[in-house]
Image (tube, rainbow, N blue to C red):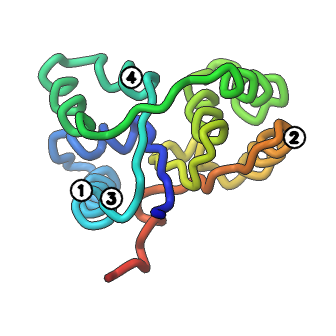
Amino acid sequence: MSASVYIESSVISYLTARPSRDVVTAARQAITLDWWQNQRHKYEVYISALVEQEISSGDPIAAEQRIQAVSSISSVAISPEAQAIAASFIASKAVPSNCVEDAMHIAIAAAQGTEYLLTWNFKHINNAETKSLIAKVIEASGYICPILCSPEELGVFNND
């Protein structure tokens, strides 16, 4: 059985965005496209209703491209357990109180038992300073913390 990956909204945005002239953003777009084309099939990938909601907002043409990109990906439920974990993130300050959606993405992935959460959000999700606190909150809730990583980090050595 393949490892499971929860794909957070930022990955889909980088995948479908117009090419950027910013060097860092352009590199992330290229890495995302490469992962999507060459690594994604090696995993069981999931999104959630929250991802669907986030990628549906903004410019209607861009939103349609994002929606099309994930049209064949299964969506996992936002369970009461995920909501409780997200509340614990906010209460413990593992995630700032004004970033409930970020807390929910992590909580959904944890409650669903996915092995990885794929994101380009280094501020509140894949953050070296907060990962240990996030893991403690998840483990205190009785779950295993997914590995929080970027497309650059996931599958980079999987060259078969």
Q: Which residue is mark 3?
A: 40
Q: Secondary structure at mark 4?
A: helix
Which of these two is toward me, 152 or 70?
Answer: 70
Q: Amino acid at mark 2?
A: Ala
Q: Secondary structure at mark 2?
A: helix
Q: Which residue is mark 1?
A: 33
Task: Answer whether labels 1 and 4 touch (C-beta < 8 Å).
Answer: no
- Give the Cα separation between the discs numbered 4 and 2: 28 Å
Packing grade of label 1 (10 A; few <14, some 14-19, many >=20) is some
Q: Is residue 7 left or right of residue 87?
A: left
Q: Residue at x 81, y 39 (%)?
A: 137
Q: Residue at x 22, y 24 (%)?
A: 63
Looking at the picture, how far across and down is residue 158, in whole percent?
A: 40, 78
Q: Which residue is mark 2?
A: 140
Q: Which callout, 2 or 1, points at the residue further toward the start of the chain?
A: 1
Figure check: 102 above or below 150? above
